[in-house]
Image (cartoon, helix red, strand yellow):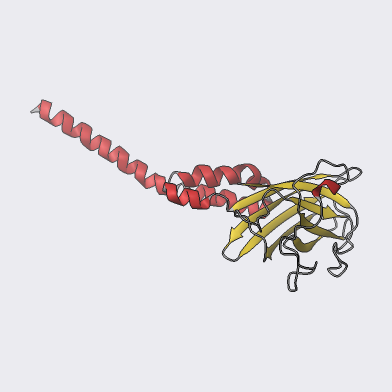
Amino acid sequence: MSRSVAPLVLMVSLLAFAGCGSQHGPQGPGPGHGAQRGGMDGMGPMEHGGRGGRHGGMQGGMPGNMQQRMQGSMAVASLTPTQGHEVRGLVMFHQMPGHVMVHARITGLKPGAEHGFHVHETGSCASSDGSSAGGHFNPDGKPHGAQDAAHHAGDMPSLKADARGVADQKFMLTGPSVQAGAASVVGRAVIVHALPDDFTTQPTGNSGDRIACGVIAGH
């Protein structure tokens, strides 16, 4: 009797253990989602914990085909200053249906000032003045302008620095994409300018010197 009971007890124990694992498995996205929100609200956690939360927390509960669809849905640019400036930051691009959501957190700006902010066509920040990034990203050959008018795919709202010289902004872009294609911002560069964008002067908006640059990388 004891020989027949022992295997049965072992089987029940294994099933209970597996059931416990399955109860915790779907919880994986919870921490990942929390880390992603932290990144969007505070930027710092997104750079490290956010990616870990998205990939580490979510992959355990996602089938392979869903993981493939998620690839290329986000891109990030880490900004470093050009010569003579102290501007740094992180810019995240999230692909949404029909548009791209952008979250930028930039430090070292002139307190209380506005700064032109664009995606440029060449993904290079090799030059000391940011000129290696080329002109505005404009695959459709449109004029420079604001989001509610004809505009370059790389035209973005100006950054508005607070009293500490920090800009923390979220906005929507129509025209560019994070996914592969002619309108993709991946492999391009983000440029912060010294002056506000007037959204009128062609083709640059009279935004002045380039004070920070970062290449956009897909994730």
Which residue corresponds to the image point at 90% horizontal and 53% vertical from the top-left? 209
Rendered-image quadrant of the N terminus: top left
Q: Residue furthest bottom?
A: 149
Q: Residue furthest left?
A: 1
Query: Residue 156 location in percent, x, y?
Result: 75, 62
Q: Disc count in the image?
A: 0
Compared with 20, 10 (above or below) is: above
Who is closer to the viewer here, 91 or 148? 148
Who is closer to the viewer here, 207 or 21? 207
Compared with 93, 17 (above or below) is: above
Left/right placement of residue 121 relative to residue 112 reads left
Q: Name the quadrant containing residue 24.
A: top left
Q: Name the quadrant containing residue 198.
A: bottom right
Q: Name the quadrant containing residue 193.
A: bottom right
Q: Residue furthest front?
A: 141
Query: Residue 20 location in percent, x, y?
Result: 34, 42
Which residue corresponds to the image point at 27% horizontal and 35% vertical from the top-left? 14
Which residue corresponds to the image point at 60% horizontal and 53% vertical from the top-left? 180
- Residue 96 is at least partly visible in this image: yes
Query: Residue 83 location in percent, x, y?
Result: 89, 42
- Residue 88 is at least partly visible in this image: no
Left/right placement of residue 104 relative to residue 75 reads right
Query: Residue 212 location in percent, x, y?
Result: 83, 48
Which residue corresponds to the image point at 67% horizontal and 61% vertical from the top-left? 176
